[in-house]
Image (cartoon, rainbow, N blue to C red):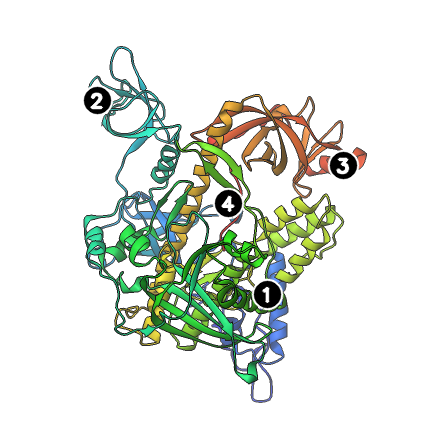
């Protein structure tokens, strides 16, 4: 029998009276509480909630902490974002898709994202109930946010959860993209881009149904007939362009991920009617020489900075920093057509030569772009810091500003290095030197805080005038980049702390600690390269940095950096704060890019409301509503990242398709029982070597060493190893490359072979390599 949390029968073991302290709860009690098996279990469960429920105080908390660590080490509970839950348990609000009806006609949903290592994907029985005004009836194929509860009396084959739909996402219109191939006899055929389409194969285009499409064009088609016999018939609705151009490649990603890319008439009309903000209700900051610093190809400029020494004698060596951000909230009001479009998109999506913006150009590139010498509305923070970077005070202001200059990172860095140009010469003493002086103080605070220092290179594709790839470069990381990053982090923290102090709900940027399982896997791997790390040890960002410092400049540097990256959680938007592990901050919000991120717009509105800065602040919104918004925009962020990544993959595959048979230098970026993933050194392109091509012997997959080991020869192919490969096949539409090994692999001898044999072998002759379109690639999450 499960006891009620916090209650004890008089005289029973573990009870208390006036002379006895409450005993610690049993492991069964704790598991029942965490598993939401008790009525009073809260939605969010952490050590604090458990201690409160079982009346645990003082030194007894140490005992509770020990029990929780033991349960976590045994795998009985999992920790995520400082919250505890049973393995395989769904959160209270989840992004899910309705997949079918059961025998009784009830709708069944399942989470959109699920780690199969946690067990079978859980099912959710949907209770319809009363819908919100304007919400359509949910149906199969719909996606939405679902509030879940554990089903109290679920049978073994019944859904483990019940759920209520709190928001449905608008269904995308059905369309098919494909490659048009002309038929000399008339008409033609279309090969669909999406190979997962149920009609995988080809479509027939009747004579006269091709429109203006030319052979090899990317087209959007309408399906006219899909009978049992013969190929489905289609009509070309739109010619999207040649597949040799980036526009076609990005449109494939837009289509595949259902990214809205056309603004509605109402939103465009609202944007067209918008007028520039005036000084009414704002402080006049137009005399402050704020400047924007951005990449040379930036289209919009939504943040400006300024700093000067603090002349207060009690703060010698301190600085006053101003960070001004475009006041998007002044033009995008809650509930408006512009607001609905922005929420649906969640964020802007950036491709190599085009942007799918969150807001129309009238807002993003005009009224909210902080152009030089033009009056612009802004929401700003004035922050006073000490010599060591500690924040002494911070206050938000709603202002009218006038940017003094539009500079690039390269221009600012050159000026700081002693080579000022025409644009920076006059600004060097009054503006740039104080900025860098304040930055030095922020660097001191950063070093003391010790955030995770995974500064991995990011490649950039440069295109020719016709939209095809010219080359791939790695832009240098400048101190000017780091200066702006530190100023933006400072403002983001200021926003979160200001709103918390005002007890105003907000959306945080959360980044959780690595899971227990990932830390154990990391310890096992590090042992193979001579670094000792106790299993179960909780690591801080500073300790991760220490591991990276140990291998700096050694042969293990790249592989350790890759494995440390894979150990980290993915950042997300949340309504309940659990901190930011990577930045090593207790509270953090996104405030500095409201033009391109809906989360920042919510934070701006929250500040306007909390600080009484206008009538256009955040409407009355509780944490549950913000949790729904956070789940939606976290999903749109992941969607954008996938679309951007896939477009780059397709472009590089198209670029390399003309170099079949060429040899490249690369590094093993992933190891599986099916083969090796490879990242090329020059372009950063990812490809695959099937295990069937590695050699004439059996290969063993050793998970702990991230390696394939030849059973007879002991030749080892390990994560991070440098190798030479030959390009065998390129599939541009899938963004995939297939290689064969030219040279590489290390002889590990008997010890390596024996360890591999214990791990369980994989037969090269029976392993099939993944199809090019299904290769899974790990990418760095944005913080």
x and y percentages locating residue 425 in the rendered image: 50, 59
The reply to whether residue 474 is in sight is: yes
Q: Is mark 4 on a helix, strand or loop?
A: helix
Q: Find disc 2 in the rendering and name its residue.
A: 209
Label 1: which secondary element: helix
| Inter-mark Cα distance, 4 to 3 | 30 Å
Q: Which of 66 and 586 is in front in this view?
A: 586
Q: How far apart are marks 4 and 2 (CA)?
A: 44 Å
Name which quarter of the figure residue 145 lies in.
Answer: bottom left
Tell which circle, 2 or 3, labels the residue nearer the N-terminal end: 2
Whole-Å distance between the Cαs marked 1 and 4? 41 Å
* Residue matched to label 4: 116
Q: Position of residue 219 (x, y in %)?
A: 30, 28
**Residue that carries the numbered disc 1 in the rendered image:** 443
- Density class for disc 3 (Cα within 10 Å; few <14, some 14-19, many ≥20) is some
Q: Choose mark 3 or mark 1, whichever is in front.
A: 1
Q: Which of marks 2 and 1 is nearer the N terminus?
A: 2
The image quarter in which residue 734 lies: top left
Q: Mark 3 — residue? A: 752
Inspect this view and state whether residue 151 appears. Answer: no
Of pointers 1 and 4, the one earlier in the residue sequence: 4
Question: If you read the primary sequence from the N terminus, does the residue marked by circle 3 or circle 1 appear first?
Answer: 1
Where disc 2 sits, the SS reads loop
Left or right for 451, reference 231: right
Residue 167 at x, y = what percent? 29, 55
Q: Residue furthest top?
A: 185
- Quadrant in the rendering for residue 61: bottom right
């Amino acid at each position: 029998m499960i006891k009620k949390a916090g209650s004890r029968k008089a005289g029973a073991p573990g009870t208390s009276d006036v002379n006895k302290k409450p005993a610690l709860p049993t492991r069964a009690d704790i598991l029942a509480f965490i598993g939401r098996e008790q009525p009073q279990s809260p939605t969010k469960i952490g050590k604090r909630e458990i201690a409160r429920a079982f009346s645990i105080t003082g030194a007894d908390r140490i005992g509770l902490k020990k029990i929780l660590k033991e349960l976590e080490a045994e795998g009985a509970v999992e920790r995520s974002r400082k919250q505890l839950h049973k393995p395989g348990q769904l959160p209270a609000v989840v992004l899910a898709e309705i997949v079918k009806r059961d025998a009784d006609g009830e709708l069944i949903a399942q989470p959109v994202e699920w780690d199969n290592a946690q067990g079978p994907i859980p099912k959710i029985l949907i209770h319809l109930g009363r819908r919100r005004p304007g919400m359509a009836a949910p149906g199969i194929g719909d996606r939405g946010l679902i509030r879940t509860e554990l089903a109290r009396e679920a049978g073994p084959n019944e859904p483990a959860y019940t759920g209520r739909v709190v928001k449905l996402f608008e269904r995308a219109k059905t369309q098919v993209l494909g490659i048009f191939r002309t038929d000399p006899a008339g008409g033609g055929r279309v090969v669909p881009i999406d190979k997962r389409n149920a009609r995988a194969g080809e479509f027939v285009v009747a004579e006269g149904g091709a429109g203006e499409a030319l052979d090899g064009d990317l087209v959007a088609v309408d399906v006219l007939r899909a009978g049992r016999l013969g190929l489905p018939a289609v009509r070309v609705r739109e010619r999207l362009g040649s597949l040799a151009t980036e526009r076609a490649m990005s449109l494939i990603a837009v289509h595949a991920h259902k990214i809205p890319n056309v603004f509605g008439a109402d939103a465009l009309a609202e944007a067209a009617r918008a007028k520039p903000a005036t000084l009414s209700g704002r402080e006049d900051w137009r005399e402050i020489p704020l400047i924007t610093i951005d990449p040379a190809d930036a289209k919009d400029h939504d943040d400006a900075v300024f700093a000067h020494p603090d002349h207060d004698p009690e703060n010698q060596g301190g600085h006053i920093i101003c960070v001004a951000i475009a006041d998007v909230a002044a033009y995008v009001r809650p509930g408006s057509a512009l607001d609905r479009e922005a929420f649906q998109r969640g964020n802007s999506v950036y491709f190599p030569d085009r942007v799918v913006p969150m807001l129309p150009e009238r807002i993003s590139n005009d009224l909210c772009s902080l152009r030089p010498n033009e009056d612009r509305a802004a929401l700003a923070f004035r922050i006073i810091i000490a010599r060591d970077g500690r924040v002494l005070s911070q206050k938000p202001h709603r202002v009218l500003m006038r940017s003094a200059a539009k500079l690039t990172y390269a221009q600012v860095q050159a000026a700081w290095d002693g080579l000022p140009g025409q644009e920076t010469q006059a600004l060097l003493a009054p503006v740039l030197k104080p900025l860098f002086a304040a930055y030095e103080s922020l660097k001191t605070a950063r070093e003391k805080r010790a955030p995770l220092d995974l500064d991995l290179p990011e490649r950039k594709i440069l295109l020719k005038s016709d939209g095809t790839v010219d080359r791939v470069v790695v832009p240098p990381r400048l101190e000017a980049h780091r200066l702006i990053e530190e100023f933006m982090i400072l403002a983001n923290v200021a926003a979160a702390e200001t709103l918390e102090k005002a007890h105003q709900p907000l959306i945080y940027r959360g980044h959780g600690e690595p899971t227990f399982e990932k830390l154990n896997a990391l310890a096992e791997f590090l042992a193979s390269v001579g670094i000792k790390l106790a299993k179960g040890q909780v690591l801080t960002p500073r300790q991760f940095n220490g591991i990276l410092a140990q291998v700096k400049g050694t042969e293990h540097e790249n592989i350790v950096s890759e494995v440390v990256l894979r150990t980290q959680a993915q950042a997300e938007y949340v309504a309940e704060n659990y901190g930011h592990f990577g930045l090593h901050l207790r509270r953090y919000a996104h405030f500095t890019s409201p033009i391109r991120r809906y989360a920042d717009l919510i934070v701006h509105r929250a500040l306007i409301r909390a600080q009484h800065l206008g009538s256009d602040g955040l409407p009355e919104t509780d944490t549950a509503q913000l949790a729904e918004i956070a789940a939606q925009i976290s999903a749109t962020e992941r969607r954008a990242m996938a679309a951007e990544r896939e477009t780059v993959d397709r472009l590089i595959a198209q670029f390399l398709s003309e170099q079949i048979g060429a040899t490249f230098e690369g590094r093993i970026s992933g190891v599986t029982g099916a083969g090796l993933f490879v990242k090329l050194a020059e372009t950063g392109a990812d490809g695959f070597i099937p295990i069937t091509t590695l050699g004439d012997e059996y290969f063993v997959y050793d998970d702990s060493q991230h390696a394939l080991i030849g059973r007879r020869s002991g030749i080892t192919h390990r994560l991070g190893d440098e190798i030479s490969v030959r390009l065998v096949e390129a599939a541009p539409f899938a963004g995939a490359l297939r290689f064969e090994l030219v040279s590489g692999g290390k002889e590990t001898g008997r010890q390596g072979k024996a360890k591999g044999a214990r791990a369980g072998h994989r037969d090269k002759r029976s392993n099939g390599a993944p199809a090019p379109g299904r290769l899974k690639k790990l990418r760095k999450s944005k913080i």
